[in-house]
Amino acid sequence: MIAKMIDLNLLPALNALLREKHVSRAAQKCNLSQSAMSRILAKLRSQFNDDLLVRAGNDYLLTPKAMEIELQLNELLPAIKQLGRSQGFSAASATQTIRISSTDMDVLLLADNIREMQMQAPNLVLSFRSQSPDSCERLISAELDFAITPLDNSRSGLHRQVLRTDTFVAVVEENSRLNSQNFDLVTYLSHKHGVFNVAENLIGRVDSALANIRQARNVTLRLPTFSQIPPLLKGSPLIFTLPESFAQYLATRYPIKILPLPFNIEPMKVYLYWHHRLHHSALHQWVRGALLERARSSEFS
């Protein structure tokens, strides 16, 4: 025999009947008339194919079936009440893995933020992945939770917030003869250059700015990470053109010289992207706030 589907709207009344073991008192608990509760009891008896409550004098006794249902309701109703309710978020108890696409420069500039996050959420795993031109597509396909990138992507379903805004500067080794007085465009173009590549076929902002004035630099070194720059710059005539925030970061740790560029480049906005499916997640809201905290990310000590 196929079991009848129980009308879930009757569960509160059923619970009251089984607890009170009395039609009138159960009706009062549910703000119903006695006749309405009697009709509900008749429906419940039909659905469960059981008397449920059997009159004994002025009260009722529960049938064995009703006792069994009462035990099940004691587990079921609290769970139903929690449906749709926020359980609250505790960073200290978070154990998920957060996947973030970024460059090593982004990680270094966010080092203070990351350390603070790991102190507050010691069991949360932050998994940084290499930045790529398809980072936003990987957000959409749920391969990533966040993407840190200067790429301008307005695809539907994506959210973003500015992580930082950067101008560009030239970086040379500390003992270079170049200085702000003799560093002009001709000198810049006569030197060899090192660059960071997100992808071989991706034209960077520096080269685009030079192309606008019909110039090109002589690139002889292409690196997969920004952190490789300092040891390769020492004793070298190379010029690296970098975001100023990262150049300042390097200057506090390595013997380098920072020079203003002899041509114009539009400031670069670096965004933190995420997909709408995670927009209301308490965990992801906390991670976003921690990554976007500017007070720590602007320090280079």
Image (spheres, rainbow, N blue to C red):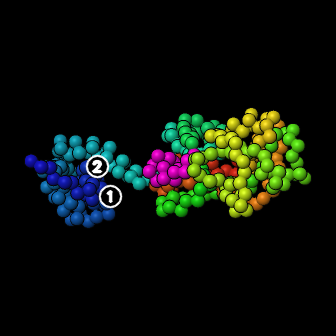
Q: Which mark is residue 19?
A: 2
Q: Earlier in the sequence, mark 1 or mark 2?
A: 2
| Residue 61 percent coordinates (x, y) | 19, 46
Residue 141 lies in magenta, yes or no? yes
Q: Residues within 10 Å of mark 1 (few under 14, many from 20)?
A: some
Q: Which mark is residue 29?
A: 1
Q: Is residue 103 visible?
A: yes
Query: Which residue is depicted at the point 52% across and 53% down?
Result: 136
CA distance separating discs 1 and 2: 10 Å
Compared across the picture, whether 117 is left or right of 255 comes to left
Quarter holding the C terminus is: top right
Give the magenta range.
131-146
Query: Which residue is depicted at the point 51% across and 51% down?
Result: 134
Residue 77 lies in magenta, yes or no? no
| Residue 240 percent coordinates (x, y) | 74, 45
Q: Given the image, on which type of amino acid does mark 2 rest?
A: Arg
Compared across the picture, whether 243 is left or right of 73 comes to right
Task: Please identify the residue farthest to the left as the structure is shown.
Answer: 1
Label 2's element? Answer: helix
Q: Given the image, on which type of amino acid does mark 1 rest?
A: Lys
Q: Is residue 253 visible?
A: no
